[in-house]
Image: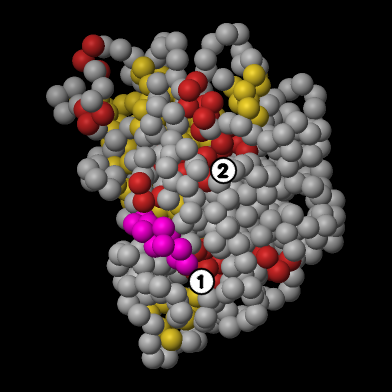
């Protein structure tokens, strides 16, 4: 493998009362946020620093790329009877990184204020990272929130593991026999309207879009050449649970498939073993509107404990669900050219290759425990994908990676991004459709509408999820033939599935600051 990749990953929710109240520690998966507090408030400047500790395992920074945490802050007034979480707007400067770390702010497209920050190592490094007393400067006056009335607030610091994909040329298409694949083209410019011509350094012609395709409508269509950050793992069950827990009841209802007095579900009503059939039954304590959304895969009546699969890839995610999550987190959908760049990097393409860089098909996962926290097993031990013929359902993200696994054994992309081949289908924007070519790459604002829908008009959705006409699926799934999981296979690149399906998810990205 190109580098060590931790076997699990995901998002953590850390909550602390603002202004003097201490925060309980919170730990989830491979990334941890603890000791959240608000310090150094300026009533005149309407700013306050959000202080926290941040750590994750098996991090890296080398001459090519690095992994990072995308950190953002949500807040609500303490004591309200219903969820009213808002997205904290950060300063573009004035932050305090911990020792050996860097903070790079990602701004709102329209206003230029900070929506979140990428945190990563400031020099070459491989190993675990632990950053203490990191502080983000929150311009709370920009939120239009009436702090003057003296109300206490609750803050929530969220962190998602990301991987930096640097600027540079890459190959679209492999020159192989994948279904409806791109004609091999070297993408060598960030101007997505430059017509392919001449001879590219990685094969085929060179330009801003693949030979034989129609140019996008705008030069800034994200064609993969410019640097971007990509979620290290597919969206997990735990991440979606945490997302739901910060929505209003009306928004939660939109973002789930079925609701009952004490149960929110994403899929059907199959047995607890059928991981593709049921998603996170929820227990609502008392009659309050704030739900505790969780899973009980081991069926022992205790939710969200080790063994309950919070690190499993989150299936039954419709296009509208995925867009809502991305918008809420300040991220955006990826394009199918970014998908290929995320898989193969700047390397010379291998015909019919998978995300791990060779044409060896995935070894079917033949056994898997319920425990998504470290005891899931694969036989044989060098399994590198999850396709048809194995257990019925998505497996834990990063399941095949260990400290000693190679890239091929782990199923890691050139950059160390996991499960781009197999497990669950990804949902990239399709350059082959007219609506897909209208995409501008706008980032989410951290805000959803009253019904829990993303408001980005270029994301090829009407908000209800009934218009995914510019979107397809790539990368295969646990229900797929091995050939579907090849990097350049586009057999369903124009398949505009709008419904929730047990083998589909969304992986979000964001342009690098």
Q: Name the residue under label 1.
A: 345
Task: Give left or right: position of 19 versus 327.
Answer: left
Say if the magenta span includes residue 351.
no
Which secondary structure is most common in the magenta stretch? loop
Residue 434 counted in the magenta span: yes
Q: Which mark is residue 15?
A: none
The residue most toward the left is 44
In the depicted view, which residue is nearer to us: 376 or 483?
483
The C terminus sits in image quarter: bottom left
Residue 318 got which mark?
Answer: 2
- Describe the element under mark 1 as helix, strand or loop: loop
x, y percent for residue 209: 41, 74
The Cα–Cα distance between marks 1 and 2, rounded to whole angstroms, is: 28 Å
Label 2: how many residues lie within 10 Å, few (<14), some (14-19) or many (20+)?
many
Q: Do the residues labelled 1 and 2 touch (CB within 8 Å)?
A: no
- Mark 1 is surrounded, within 10 Å at the Cα level, by few (under 14), some (14 to 19) or many (20 or more) other residues, namely many
Towards the viewer: 373 or 458: 458
- Which quarter of the figure has residue 383? bottom right
Is residue 145 something one can see in this rendering?
A: yes
Give the image location of residue 458, x and y in percent.
36, 51
Say which residue appears at 32% left-offset and 73% top-offset: 193
Magenta extent: 431-441
Residue 234, x across and y down, in percent? 59, 50
């Amino acid at each position: 493998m190109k580098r060590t990749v931790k076997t699990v990953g995901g998002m953590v929710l850390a909550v602390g009362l603002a202004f003097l109240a201490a925060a309980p520690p919170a730990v989830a998966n491979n990334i941890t946020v603890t000791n959240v507090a608000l310090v150094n408030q300026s009533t005149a400047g309407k700013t306050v620093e959000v202080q926290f500790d941040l750590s994750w395992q098996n991090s890296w920074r080398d001459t090519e790329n690095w992994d990072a945490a995308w950190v953002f802050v949500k807040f609500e007034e303490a004591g309200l009877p219903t969820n009213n979480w808002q997205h904290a707007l950060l300063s573009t400067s004035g932050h305090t990184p911990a020792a050996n770390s860097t903070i790079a702010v990602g701004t709102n497209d329209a206003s230029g204020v900070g929506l979140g920050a990428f945190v990563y190592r400031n020099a070459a490094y491989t190993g675990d990272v632990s950053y203490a007393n990191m502080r983000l400067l929150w311009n709370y006056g920009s939120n239009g929130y009436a702090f003057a009335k003296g109300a206490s607030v609750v803050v929530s610091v969220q962190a998602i593991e990301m991987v930096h994909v640097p600027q540079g040329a890459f190959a679209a298409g492999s020159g192989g026999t994948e279904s409806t694949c791109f004609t091999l083209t070297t993408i060598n410019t960030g101007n997505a309207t430059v017509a392919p011509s001449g001879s590219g350094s990685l094969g085929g012609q060179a330009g801003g879009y693949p030979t034989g395709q129609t140019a996008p409508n705008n030069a800034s269509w994200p064609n993969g050449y410019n640097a971007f950050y990509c979620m290290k793992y597919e969206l997990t069950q735990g991440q979606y649970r945490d997302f739901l827990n910060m929505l209003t009841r009306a928004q939660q209802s939109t973002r789930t498939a079925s609701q009952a007095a004490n149960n929110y579900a994403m899929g059907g009503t199959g047995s607890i073993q059928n991981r593709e059939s049921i998603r996170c039954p929820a227990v609502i304590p008392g009659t309050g509107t704030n739900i505790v959304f969780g899973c009980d895969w081991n069926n022992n009546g205790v939710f969200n404990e080790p063994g309950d699969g919070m690190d499993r890839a989150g299936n039954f995610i419709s296009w509208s669900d995925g867009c809502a999550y991305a918008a809420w987190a300040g991220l955006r959908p990826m394009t199918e050219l970014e998908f290929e760049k995320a898989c193969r990097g700047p390397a010379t393409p291998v015909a019919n290759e998978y995300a791990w860089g060779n044409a060896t098909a995935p070894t079917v996962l033949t056994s898997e425990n319920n425990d998504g926290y470290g005891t899931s097993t694969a036989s044989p031990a060098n399994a590198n994908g999850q396709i048809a013929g194995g257990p019925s359902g998505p497996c834990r993200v990063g399941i095949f990676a260990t400290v000693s696994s190679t890239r091929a054994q782990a199923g890691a992309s050139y950059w160390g991004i996991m499960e781009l081949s197999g497990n669950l289908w990804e949902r990239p924007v399709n350059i082959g459709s007219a609506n897909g070519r209208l995409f501008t790459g706008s980032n989410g604002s951290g805000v959803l509408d009253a019904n829990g829908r993303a408001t980005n008009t270029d994301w090829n959705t009407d908000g209800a999820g009934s218009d995914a006409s510019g979107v397809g699926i790539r990368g295969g799934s646990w229900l797929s033939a091995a050939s579907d999981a090849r990097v350049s296979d586009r057999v369903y690149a124009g398949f505009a599935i709008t419904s929730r399906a047990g083998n589909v998810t969304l992986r979000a990205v964001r342009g690098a600051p």
